[in-house]
Image: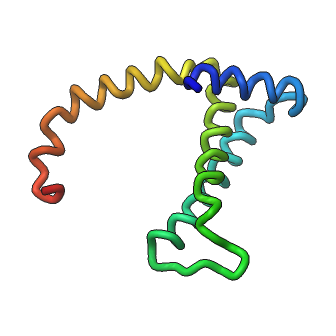
Amino acid sequence: MTINEAQQQVDTWIKTIGVRYFSELTNMAILTEEVGELARVMARKYGDQSFKKNESAEHLGDEMADVLWVLICLANQTGIDLTEAFKKNMEKKTIRDADRHTGNEKLQ
């Protein structure tokens, strides 16, 4: 699935099953919440915290997908073509950081 196809699929789902998009501000709050849920799993799987009895690392992919879902909703609502935005972002990073990381002693 391409990013564009994902944007179309989310839009179709919202308009047929979800009734309508939540407001942009509500979706921004939901995105923050979903990132927090992802952070909780990451902190327990890769960090120093331990899982509670009802938690597990099995939800890592699902939490990442939740973040992606809401990000796609926000892109659709604000008219952002994520494919184009990502291409431009990669070009910017490639030019800006061409030698930045290879010269970083911390990464060697």
- Give the residue at x 17% y 32%: 98
Picture quadrant where residue 55 is located: bottom right
Picture quadrant where residue 86 is located: top left
Picture quadrant where residue 71 is located: top right
The quadrant of the picture occupied by the N terminus is top right
Relative vertical location of residue 42 with respect to residue 104 in this rendering, above or below: below
Q: Is residue 84 left or right of residue 12?
A: left
Residue 88, x across and y down, in percent: 38, 21
Residue 14, x across and y down, in percent: 81, 29
Q: Is residue 54 left or right of residue 108?
A: right
Residue 12, x across and y down, in percent: 79, 22
Q: Nearer the viewer, residue 96 or 56?
A: 56
Q: Nearer the viewer, residue 18 or 9?
A: 9
The quadrant of the picture occupied by the C terminus is bottom left
- Give the residue at x 77% y 34%: 23
- Give the residue at x 80% y 30%: 21
Q: Is residue 23 left or right of residue 34?
A: right
Residue 89, x across and y down, in percent: 38, 27
- Give the residue at x 66% y 42%: 28
